[in-house]
Image (cartoon, rainbow, N blue to C red):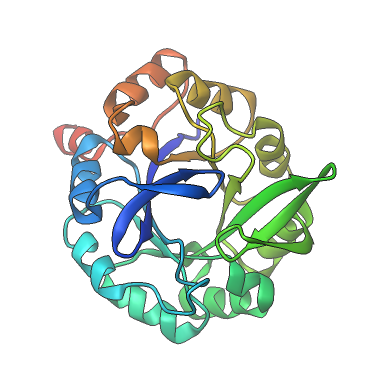
Amino acid sequence: MLTKRIIPCLDIKDGKTVKGINFINLIDAGDPVEQAAYYATAGADELVFLDITATVEGRKTFAALVKKIAQQINIPFTVGGGISTISDVEILLKAGADKISINSAAVKKPDIINQIALEFGSQCVVVAIDSRNLNGRNIVHTHGGRVPTALETLSWAKEAQERGAGEILLTSMDHDGTKQGFAKELTGTMSRMLSIPVIASGGAGTMEHFAELFMDNAASAALAASIFHFRQVEIGQLKQYLIKKGIAMRPTIMQKIIA
């Protein structure tokens, strides 16, 4: 049975962890290095770092901060924000990232997906898709969710897979920060359509939301931020809850060591 993953996300602005609702009204959510160190021992399966204003501000991701975080963790580490060239990828991998998440650059120049997959392998390429429902159509947005594109979410996800993406990080902007539950229908449709893993993001508010997501569709992983940052849900307790619901979870690093 395929196991599910729980992934906390560090949304970074000005070197600090932040969180908002529908991508706006950002508030401070703690020191990213301290948060990362906590998650590495709290049972997180992976960690995602997204420099959410790098593209908007026309700069590169904070490689120095990535390096500090990488030194504190022993779980897979995905980094995104401001990545537009192979050189950017090399810098972040050397800083300690295991995977690279690209969004705006992939939409602007889709061939970069092929290039990164060819140079570093598909397992390194996570294509992040920020999706909002506009007039009944799920539309891809770029620049931290600020700019709508002409791309439909599902068709873009399919193209990303065909170009070599190893994983899709799907964020529902309509659900982000609302704590009303994940976009189950869209996530489920995408998961069943693709042969690569889909990470669901946006809307987690309770442990029940994770159970509903995993039981109702084929999502490989669930990503959340504020409920973990503010300790409203503890990852270890969440995993135990999901296991009792009959959902197969990945063992934590400590469980592997004990076994």
Q: Nearer the viewer, residue 243 or 168?
A: 168
Q: Residue at x 16, y 38 (%)?
A: 257
Is 150 placed above or below 6 here? below
Decide if residue 14 is on the left or right side of residue 83: left
Q: Nearer the viewer, residue 245 or 52?
A: 52
Specify whether 242 is left or right of 112.
Answer: left
Q: Position of residue 243 (x, y in %)?
A: 40, 19
The quarter of the image holding the C terminus is: top left
Q: Residue at x 49, y 79 (%)?
A: 58
Q: Quadrant of residue 225?
A: top left
Relative to 94, say whether 233 is above or below.
above
**Taking the image as drawn, is residue 194 in sight?**
no
Across and down, in percent, residue 57 comes to 47, 75
Q: Residue furthest top?
A: 244
Q: Position of residue 237 (x, y in %)?
A: 30, 22
Residue shown at 38% from the left, 17% from the top: 241
Query: Which residue appears at 29% of the width and 34% of the height?
Result: 230
Residue 219, can we see it? yes
